[in-house]
Image (cartoon, rainbow, N blue to C red):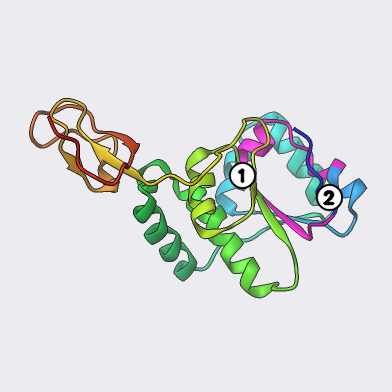
Amino acid sequence: MVANFNSLNYIILDNTAFVSAFDPNQIALQNPRIQFYITSSVYDEALSNPRSSRLIEIAEAQQILKVIDPLPESLKFICKTAEETGDIAALSKTDQEIIALYIDLNKNLPDQRGIIISDDYSVQNTCARLKIPFYSYQKRGIQKSIKWEIYCPNCYETFPPKLLGKNCDHCGATLKRRAYRGKKRKL
């Protein structure tokens, strides 16, 4: 995929961008005013991968990468939104932080345009719900926002979003998620 990042002021990167060999330094050569942001969680994850850590070291040396953590109130807002979409159990703490960081930067830099780069579908779905621009680097990316419901594949009971991957209270099966269709299924 090719994207035009020339109109952007900042990009928030998920670790999937680094793992996929996204090179912020190449983008900065085309757009010298652009700034890249990651959270300390992304930084820690990326440093465990040799390719990612090399890209980060270069971006830091070029002073185009900043590590900033979001405010607690922005994280709470993201958690609430992810519960509404049903994505909360599929979003890691790091995923929640990069979306919350966008909220903070958007408030602090209202005249600037930014985007989140992530191949994570739950990140994209939560961003779509909040009308936060995102870009999928390696994958196709979501086409529309989805509201998920958590259900038992055996007895078809539904559960709160935080229980994704846990066991059903009724039959013990592992809970899964499916797109919410607006009404309960009949057996």
Q: Position of residue 120 (x, y in %)?
A: 54, 38
Q: Are marks 1 and 2 in contact (CB under 8 Å)?
A: no
The crowd level at tag 2 (other Cα within 10 Å; few <14, some 14-19, many 20+) is few
Q: Residue 106: horizontal and vertical position, in percent?
A: 64, 68
**47 is higher (above) or lower (below) than 131:** above
Farthest left residue in view: 170
Q: Quadrant of residue 14?
A: top right
Q: Amino acid at mark 2?
A: Ala
> Residue 10 at what x, y percent from top left?
75, 58
Give the magenta range: 7-26
Residue 69 in sight from this viewpoint: no
Q: Residue 126: which disc?
A: none
Residue picked out by circle 1: 14
- Is residue 145 rendered magenta in the image? no
132 to 186, vertically: above or below: below
Residue 23, image quadrant: top right
In the image, is 33 to the left or to the right of 163? right
Q: Nearer the viewer, mark 1 or mark 2?
A: 1
First of labels 1, 2 by sequence position: 1
